[in-house]
Image (cartoon, rainbow, N blue to C red):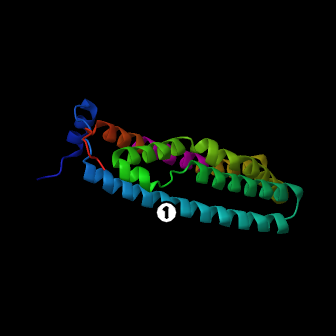
């Protein structure tokens, strides 16, 4: 079988005629396991990053000169710790009893939890870091005697990074919504566990 060309895929996408195929129970079980592993790895990476941010900005608060840099460093640490708390609070948790009862509902619930978390990443992940970063960047501008254009460029770089993180998470949330729709389209049968 030859792979379809780009034009036929584009026409199929524009027609909207192709429906998303429902998932089999075995596929749902496999994906539920992969989701749990992926969430655990992501959370571990995030907690390590939060520890690194807290350690580095703790050193900045001790050794860098000036009120702005010290205050900004402490605010970044507070923001990072808040992000870690929000991640622990918002992240989907394992419930072996629920998984054994109905794997389809269990998997769908975990997907919905992750989708809500990723769709709102701007509020709980990025926003807590902005005050500390703004104060810290202001401190850098004072210490380095940056021109207004230099400060704007420095701030724009950080804003673009935050925008990229926000867009990537919104895209991931949309992909999870598609998976939730596929589960919803899967016919339920007795004895799904």
Question: Where on the picture, by quarter, is residue 23?
Answer: top left
Residue 70 on image: x %, y %: 84, 59
How crowded is the residue under tag 1: few (<14 C-alpha within 10 Å), some, or many (20+)?
few
Q: How far across and how far down the image is residue 87, in percent?
A: 59, 52
Instruction: Residue at 63%, 45% (x, y): give it.
Output: 124
The boundaries of the magenta stretch are 162-175
| Position of residue 83 measured from the top left corner of the image (x, y, whole percent) | 65, 52
Q: Secondary structure at mark 1?
A: helix
Instruction: Decide: is 114 above or below 60.
Output: above
How many numbered markers are drawn? 1
- Decide whether the magenta segment is chiefly helix, strand or loop: helix
Q: Residue at x 84, y 67 (%)?
A: 62
* In this rendering, position of residue 180 left or right of residue 18: right
Left or right: where does residue 140 sit relative to residue 12?
right
**Residue position marked by numbered label 1 in the rendering:** 41
Q: Which residue shows up at 69% across the image and 47% down it?
A: 128
């Amino acid at each position: 079988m030859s792979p379809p060309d780009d034009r036929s895929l584009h026409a199929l996408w524009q027609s909207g005629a192709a429906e998303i195929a429902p998932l089999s129970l075995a596929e749902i079980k496999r994906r539920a396991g992969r989701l749990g592993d992926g969430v655990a790895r992501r959370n571990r990476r995030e907690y390590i990053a939060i520890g690194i941010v807290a350690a580095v900005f703790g050193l900045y608060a001790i050794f860098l000169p000036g009120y702005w840099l010290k205050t900004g460093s402490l605010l970044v640490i507070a923001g990072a710790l808040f992000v870690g708390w929000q991640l622990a609070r918002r992240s989907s948790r394992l419930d072996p009893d629920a998984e054994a009862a109905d794997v389809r509902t269990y998997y769908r619930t975990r997907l919905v939890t992750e989708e809500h978390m990723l769709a709102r990443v701007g509020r709980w992940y990025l926003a807590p870091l902005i005050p500390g970063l703004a104060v810290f960047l202001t401190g850098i501008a004072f210490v380095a005697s940056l021109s207004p254009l230099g400060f704007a460029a420095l701030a724009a770089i950080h804003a673009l990074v935050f925008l990229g993180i926000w867009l990537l998470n919104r895209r991931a949330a949309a992909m999870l919504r598609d998976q939730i729709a596929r589960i919803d389209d899967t016919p339920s049968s007795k004895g799904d566990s």
